[in-house]
Image (cartoon, rainbow, N blue to C red):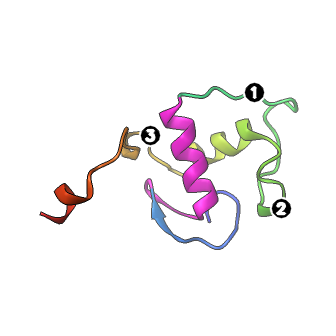
Amino acid sequence: CKVCGDKASGYHYGVTSCEGCKGFFRRSIQKQIEYRCLRDGKCLVIRLNRNRCQYCRFKKCLAVGMSRDSVRYGRVPKRSRER
């Protein structure tokens, strides 16, 4: 994973990333969450501590190239995908 260094599960939102960072990024965009850092935005984001600072994790998602525009709002019904 380009964000935290964990094993990547695929190419998500423009970047190879793990399921955890994929879901975190999607939720952050869909819910329009604004995070704050208690350490001046300089936290180390690695697999072991990726959940400690959401601000720095989100900032790193954007820095490595995750695209806000790739996140969909709502589900695409299974029937329309199969056609």
Mark number displayed over residue 36 = 1
Three-letter code, disc 1: Arg
Residue at image x 34%, y 46%?
75
Front residue (pair 28, 67): 28
Three-letter code, disc 2: Leu
Q: Residues within 10 Å of mark 1 (few under 14, many from 20)?
A: few
Three-letter code, disc 3: Arg
Mark number displayed over residue 48 = 2
The stretch in magenta equals: 13-31
Q: Reply yes or no: does residue 14 show up in magenta.
A: yes
Mark number displayed over residue 70 = none
Dot 1 or dot 3, earlier in sequence? 1
The quarter holding residue 28 reads top right
Count of marks, rendered view: 3
Q: In the rendering, at what x and y percent does residue 6 appear?
A: 69, 69
Residue at image x 56%, y 45%?
25
Mark number displayed over residue 68 = 3
